[in-house]
């Protein structure tokens, strides 16, 4: 696939999907594709782990098959289930025609009566897809063991049908918010990528890309404030998604981050009342200096797309990663 010729091309393609990937991230995706290994992406909640999988699928122009993990998720909901109602109707219909159980047994355990769940759906896809196994750390150890076996050879065993091998090996992205450790076997099977909170330059670049109508100086002041909040002992620090929501909020309030606007919009950034109260007490010392009164130019123009796909776009090269 042309996208995976080199990691620079991957980085540029992700940028066209409005995802600013670091060189480290692009290299990890490149290696995961060529080594046919799952990519385990870890980091704080809200740094773009799930969005990375979506952006890759969009860049590949393929389907994103998502398995959302949670406590109690079992193999059946991950792999397949039999369509019991359809099987029962088929049995009743054939019984009325005088057929015996031995005659219909093989039919009802065929692909026609199989309900594919995310993992089997990804394996049976007619082309390469992106398989997102989201928040794996929320699942139980049993599911981790099952996935380890399934992703080792990209095949699964269905007792009634036998071994099912992947038609096309999917690009598998597993995400984790670090709420628990994984087994050494899982770590060995996967390539590892850690995505931290973005740097100041990265976060400004993300805001300018996602919300082009915002003023550059306002974006910089916002990021300075948010990065300060992330150093505080809060119950939940603001993620990138909350940064973007807050940027839209300040635009709607027509605010240059004056104290009143910040105070009334803190709930967009902070999700716990105790965090809001903590920040409000220190708001005067946390806010950056007053903004310049000069009108700042808007970042309204659409970023140019580089015709040479192997080169980094000029607009992206302004930001350091």
Image: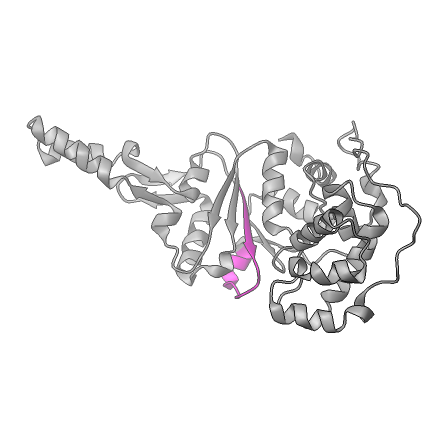
The picture quadrant where one finds residue 262 is bottom right
Q: Quadrant of residue 307?
A: top right
Q: Residue furthest left?
A: 98
Does 123 sit above or below residue 271?
above
Count of numbered badges drawn on the protein: 0
Q: In the image, is residue 2 above or below residue 320?
A: above
Q: Position of residue 288 (x, y in %)?
A: 84, 63
Where is residue 101 shown, x and y percent of the image?
A: 11, 36
Quick one: 30 or 131, which is closer to the camera?
Answer: 131
Left or right: where 31 falls relative to 286: left
Q: Is residue 132 visible?
A: yes
Q: Is residue 38 above or below residue 261?
A: above
Q: Which corner quadrant of the image does residue 164 belong to?
A: top left
**Quadrant of image for the N terminus:** top right
**What residue is at 29 percent from the left and 31 percent from the top?**
112
Residue 50 position, x and y percent, is 58, 49
Q: Quick check: is 281 in the magenta stretch?
A: no
Q: Residue at 89% of width from left, 45% of height from top?
A: 296
Indicate whether 74 appears above or below 11.
below
| Residues shaded magenta | 171-188
Identify the colour scheme used: one colour
């Amino acid at each position: 696939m042309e996208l995976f010729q080199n990691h620079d091309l991957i980085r540029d393609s992700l940028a066209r999907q409005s995802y600013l990937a670091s060189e480290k991230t692009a290299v990890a995706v490149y290696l995961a594709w060529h080594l046919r290994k799952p990519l385990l992406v870890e980091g704080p909640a809200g740094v773009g782990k799930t969005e990375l999988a979506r952006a890759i699928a969009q860049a590949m122009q393929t389907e994103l098959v998502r398995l959302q993990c949670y406590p109690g998720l079992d193999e059946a909901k991950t792999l397949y289930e039999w369509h019991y109602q359809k099987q029962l109707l088929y049995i009743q219909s054939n019984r009325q025609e005088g057929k015996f159980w031995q005659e219909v047994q093989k039919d009802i355990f065929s692909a026609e009566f199989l309900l594919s769940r995310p993992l089997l759906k990804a394996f049976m896809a007619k082309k390469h897809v992106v398989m997102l196994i989201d928040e794996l750390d929320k699942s139980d150890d049993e599911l981790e063991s099952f996935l380890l076996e399934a992703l080792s050879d990209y095949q699964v065993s269905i007792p009634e049908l036998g071994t099912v091998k992947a038609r096309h090996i999917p690009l598998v992205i597993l995400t984790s918010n670090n709420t628990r450790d994984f087994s050494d076997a899982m770590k060995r099977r996967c390539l590892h990528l850690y995505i931290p909170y973005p740097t100041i330059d990265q976060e400004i670049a993300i805001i300018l890309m996602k919300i082009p109508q915002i003023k550059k100086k306002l974006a910089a002041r916002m990021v300075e404030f948010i990065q300060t909040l992330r150093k505080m002992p809060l119950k939940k620090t603001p993620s990138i998604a909350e940064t973007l929501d807050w940027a839209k909020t300040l635009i709607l309030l027509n605010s240059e981050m004056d104290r009143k606007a910040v105070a009334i919009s803190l709930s967009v950034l902070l999700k716990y009342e105790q965090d809001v109260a903590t920040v409000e007490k220190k708001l005067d010392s946390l806010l950056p200096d007053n903004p310049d009164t000069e009108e700042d130019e808007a970042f309204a123009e659409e970023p140019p797309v580089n015709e040479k796909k192997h080169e980094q776009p000029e607009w992206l090269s302004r930001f350091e990663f």
